[in-house]
Image (cartoon, rainbow, N blue to C red):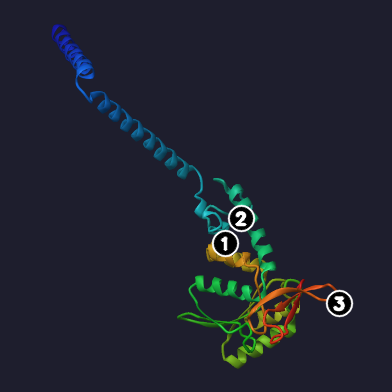
Amino acid sequence: MGRGRGSNDKAIFEALSGLAWMFVLAWMFIPGFKALVFTVLLWLFVIAVVSLLIWAIYVSMRTKPALSQLGTATPRWRPDFCPGKAPTNGGGILQTVRASREQDISEGLRKIDWFQFEKLVELIYQHRGFAVTRLGGANPDGGVDLILKSTTEESIVQCKHWRKQMVGVRHIREFLGTLTDQKIPKGIFVTLAGYTEDARQLAHKHGIQIFKETDVIEMLEESGLTYSKEISKLLSDKTKTCPKCEHEMVLRTARGTGNRFWGCSTYPRCRCIINLEG
């Protein structure tokens, strides 16, 4: 047994020695052999580097949340989430990123004009699967800005881009009249500043859904629009639209007072103005 093992080791050694001598002779006397060896070594190096990068990316994706998930998943969608429970797996970072984005959206909502606000609400319901017809703007809409239709329901949406003024009872009553006139039982009222308590109770009594700024931000999240290019473009749009004729408005300065205001670009055909704060 020992003698046979020694013979095998000797044979292996002689074979390796023979290969080594063949490599040395080929290196010295065969043209192009050096280039072939360098090419093989280079490819082996490239394969090793690529494999290392793929492994690193795989490990990173398993241990960190994907950037595409930021803002698209809200806490209540997470199966491991419950009130009072500290978030895990980077939840603190996600919450910080989400809070920062919500602040950006809040500021953007207050900077856009009424026309862009209507388009934003329209975009939300389109992404929720509704067919949306826009009747608001400069047209005589009779209190109807959007009509939503699905296979099972039809609703009327009234949008008020009010940043300071709260919706009162009078506005809800007028909206109730619109619903009656249109013979559509379901109504949705969307604003920013919110509602008086009496208006909220009246809306609740008649089944009218009411939304304020925080609700709009939440709807953007639920619709997967928080980080979308569509919303970013809409919120960064600095143009103003005339509420009477829907032409673009331009920033002007009053001659007497020096106060700045938005005026319709078609002046004097359209004399609509909006003060700078409005």
Residue 275: tell me if it is visible: yes
Q: Name the residue at the right extreme.
A: 257
Dot 3 alpha-carbon crowd within 10 angstroms: few under 14, some 14 to 19, many 20 or more:
few
Q: Amino acid at mark 3?
A: Gly
Q: Residue at x 38, y 37 (%)?
A: 50
Which residue is tagged 2?
98
* CA distance for labels 2 and 1: 9 Å
In the foreground, 244 or 90 = 244
In the rendered image, the vertical position of residue 7 relative to residue 252, given as above or below: above
Q: Is residue 38 left or right of residue 55?
A: left
Q: Residue at x 57, y 61 (%)?
A: 226
Q: Earlier in the sequence, mark 2 or mark 3?
A: 2
Q: Amino acid at mark 1?
A: Thr
Which residue is tagged 1?
226
Please give the label number shown on residue 68.
none
Number of numbered discs on residues: 3
In the rendered image, the vertical position of residue 47 relative to residue 195, given as above or below: above
Q: Amino acid at mark 2?
A: Arg
Q: Secondary structure at mark 3?
A: loop
Measuring from the top left, give residue 101's x and y in whole percent: 62, 57
Measuring from the top left, give residue 107's x and y in whole percent: 69, 63
